[in-house]
Image: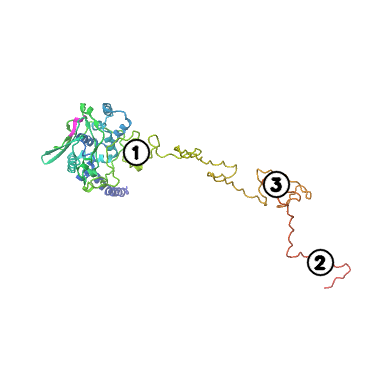
Amino acid sequence: MPHQPKFTAFVLAVVFFFLQIFTPLLSAQSAPPTPQELDQLLSPVALYPDSLLSQILTASTNPQEILDVDNWLYSNPGLTGTALTDAAQQQGFDPAFIALVNFPQVLEMMAQHVDDYAAIGQAFSNDQAAVSDSVQRLRAQAYSAGSLQSNSQQTVQVQQAPGQTIYVIQPANPQVVYVPQYDPTVVYSGPSTGTIVAASMITFGAGIAIGALIASNQPWGWNGWGWNWGARRVYYNHVYWGGWPRPYRPPNPWYRPRPIVWRNRPGYGGNWGYRPPNYRPPYPGNRPVYGRPPYGPGNPPGYRPPGNRPTPLPGPGNPGTRPPNRPGTPVTRPTPRPGQPTIQPVPTPQPRPNPPGGRPSRPTSPGQPSIQPVKPAPVGGTRPTNPSQPRPTPNPSPNRPPGQNPPPGQRPPGQNRPPSPGRPASQPTRPATQPKPSARPAPQPKPAPPPNTPRPQR
């Protein structure tokens, strides 16, 4: 085959061309994040309690499961407590998610920013020590800024280890967990004013009772989670985490990670005072109302700013925007107060029906006279008759034979149109005008010669 070497060379050239284009992109996506980039990713959750943080990091290793569990919570809003964890176990979810179903606001936050947590899970699977160092760096910055303090919701312990300082965060009440809420662009840099403002940088939502998780002897119980900061490892069920023995397999794996735009994250360039444009802190606030469509290829996750949300429908709790009145319904007015004049409702004008065989008439506004369509005048100069006026019966002229009509614009003598009601009597008919003489006289015939006159000879 003489053309085979040419075809092979062409295919190799095409493959080499595409490798030159996509190799930098693939290497950029597979390259591990730098310490600064890890700090940007972990800044929203680095100040969470140790056990809750270990559950979040191990759950991030399967971003598709984050979306599946969050959709499952939306379809099962009535499950709580032990019934909720038992139902999650029957679904085959990983142990981290069986524990996190008791924190639905945290799962919703992870679903809305699933690209960030997919990158966190990848970095955590590759190097737990680097993730541990990033968490301790962020906690040290928040502690130095005065933001991280012990209070009635949490206890902050500072421990000295060989070569490093360890910051441990635990719930103040072992039976109740408060999820912190803070802005990473402020909490790590510190305020410009005193300590009173710094104490309010971290707020807390409603406490979540975890008594059932503490009393449970299941592997996902609360006491089985935590960190060994000296070994820089996460433990689950009192042993170091190295993956799940029977991992969850998504029935419909549709999610694909998207690249991280570091400029849109706080801490870009090591500047924690930098606030990205249109940035919204990922607060794990109140869970939205159940009823949104589940996340999927047609409804991708992501935070939607208020301007892009659909307009709420008017209702008892939300007046919204009143829809326009339909044609024919009167415009309702509010009831006047005592002593004020009553305003009558203004009816909406109705369009008139179209006349048969004619053009449609335009609707008139209130107080404007109706404009009737003007019919063209007939040929011959006769005036149009009024439909409401009786039409007189023509009488034959005595001077003309029947079947002949008078010329246009003339009436037979002695015949006048009877006056119509409301109109003045018609004037007497003018005599017919005489034809004007022509400017050139007509040629006269020559007289004939007498019979006996001889003709002249030529």
How far apart are the two marked residues, 2 and 3, measured between alpha carbons? 56 Å
Where 323 sits versus 10, above or below? above
Rendered residue at 68%/49% (across/down): 424
Q: Is residue 446 above or below residue 33?
A: below
Q: Amino acid at mark 3?
A: Pro
Secondary structure at numbered mark 1: loop
> Residue beneath label 3, please?
419
Is 222 in the magenta? yes
| Sequence-first disc among 1 and 3 | 1
Are circles 2 and 3 on residues that touch, CB within 8 Å? no
| Pointer 2 residue | 446
Q: Residues within 10 Å of mark 1 (few under 14, many from 20)?
A: few
Q: Residue furthest left?
A: 162
Q: CA distance from mark 1 to mark 3?
A: 80 Å
Give the residue type at disc 2. Answer: Lys
**392 left or right, relative to 44:** right
The magenta segment is 221-226
Residue 349: numbered disc = none
With 371 as the anchor, is 179 left or right in this view?
left
Q: Position of residue 384 (x, y in %)?
A: 65, 48
Q: Which of marks 2 and 1 precedes in the sequence?
A: 1
Residue type at mark 1: give it. Asn
Mark in the foreground, 1 or 3: 3
Location of mark 1 (residue): 299
Where the C terminus falls, by quadrant?
bottom right
Find residue 307 and report its image quarter. Answer: top left
Q: Is residue 93 magenta?
A: no
Q: Residues within 10 Å of mark 2 (few under 14, many from 20)?
A: few
Furthest residue toward bottom: 458
